[in-house]
Image (cartoon, rainbow, N blue to C red):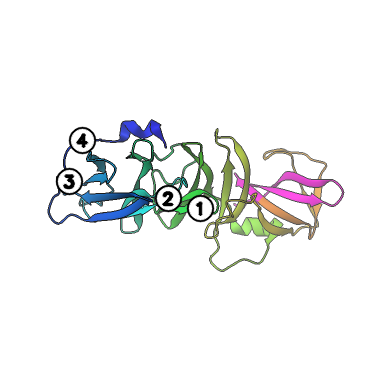
Amino acid sequence: MLRAACGLLLAVLTPYAWAAEDGEIRFEVAQGVTAHARLQSDGTLVVGTNRSPARQLLQAATDEEGTGTRLSHADYNFDGYQDLSSSATLGQVNESVVVHLYEPTSGQFLSLVAPTGPEISCEGFWALTPDPATRTLSSSCRSGPMWYSDIYRFQGDRLYLYRSMRDALVETEALAQVLKLDASQEMEILVVWTTWSPDGQRLDHAVWNAFDPPSADAPLQGHGAKVVPARLPLYSRAGDSSTARYLIKDDHVELLDVADGWAQLRFNNPRRGPVLGWVKLPTYE
């Protein structure tokens, strides 16, 4: 799997060169195939299997001191083979993870390369968790007081960003003037979740709780709210100055996005079906 990652793999066909006091792990990759990895003092892993006397030299995750590496295994690409991972704590709270996928044809472990792009909150892999039920990988990191998450999926051998989150920058006092949010948990923080296609197209987005990621297998559903004013103008685009559409008091809507003093809503009209639009939030001098 992921043959494009081979360029990032350091393969060395040499005997084991174990260093004293290094951690190690043995695990069953698949029936009849076992792997053995040992960490060396320079932060590299010497890895081999019972399929061949050849050994690989792979880069492991390390902390700021170049130590503190933990070794484990899991099926990260859901192909039925156990893969090798290493992790280390950085900045006291973030767990950096390096994954090497087992490639059954060659019998080698190949680096799983983290996708890049402006929509990704956590560059690299952090506290990476595979979910076999949804065939997704979740990566979570902390920046300042906030925790952020990225959810990845495979298309064939290629890993891509499936869902991301960003801050919903909204003045809560201004939002309360036009929308009353449905009952929520204490300390809830609203963020915008986005679903992406394998080719990077935005499929849907919605405002939801940062601490309660949406189900990876369900369409995004926005945070529910009720309209507060007697009549609330509903614009086609943020920044519009005129509209003939209005919502009325107590209409139930979903909050989909917030941007520059505007909020995007979805209203399920009983006769016309879903109606999307933007409402302007009050400003305070």
Mark found first going from the N terminus, 1 or 3: 3
**The disc labelled 4 sits on which kind of residue?**
Leu
Q: Name the residue under label 3.
A: 42
Q: Which residue is drawn at 61% across and 47% down?
A: 258
Mark found first going from the N terminus, 3 or 4: 4
Provide the secondary structure element on which disc 1 rests. Answer: loop
Question: For the residue carrying disc 2, how many other residues have a C-alpha within 10 Å: few (<14), some (14-19), or many (20+)?
Answer: some
Q: Name the residue under label 1.
A: 132
Q: Name the residue under label 4.
A: 13
- The reply to whether the C-beta atoms of the residues labelled 1 and 2 are less than 8 Å apart is yes
Q: Distance between the residues labelled 4 and 2?
A: 25 Å
Task: Give coordinates of residue 256: x percent, y percent.
Answer: 65, 49
Mark toward the viewer: 4 or 1: 4
Q: Name the residue under label 2.
A: 75
Provide the secondary structure element on which disc 2 rests. Answer: loop
Q: In which quarter of the image is the N terminus?
A: top left
Provide the secondary structure element on which disc 4 rests. Answer: loop
Q: Distance between the residues labelled 2 and 3?
A: 26 Å
Q: Residue at x 57, y 51 (%)?
A: 216
Instruction: Confirm whether the magenta stretch covers residue 260.
Output: yes
Mark toward the viewer: 4 or 2: 4
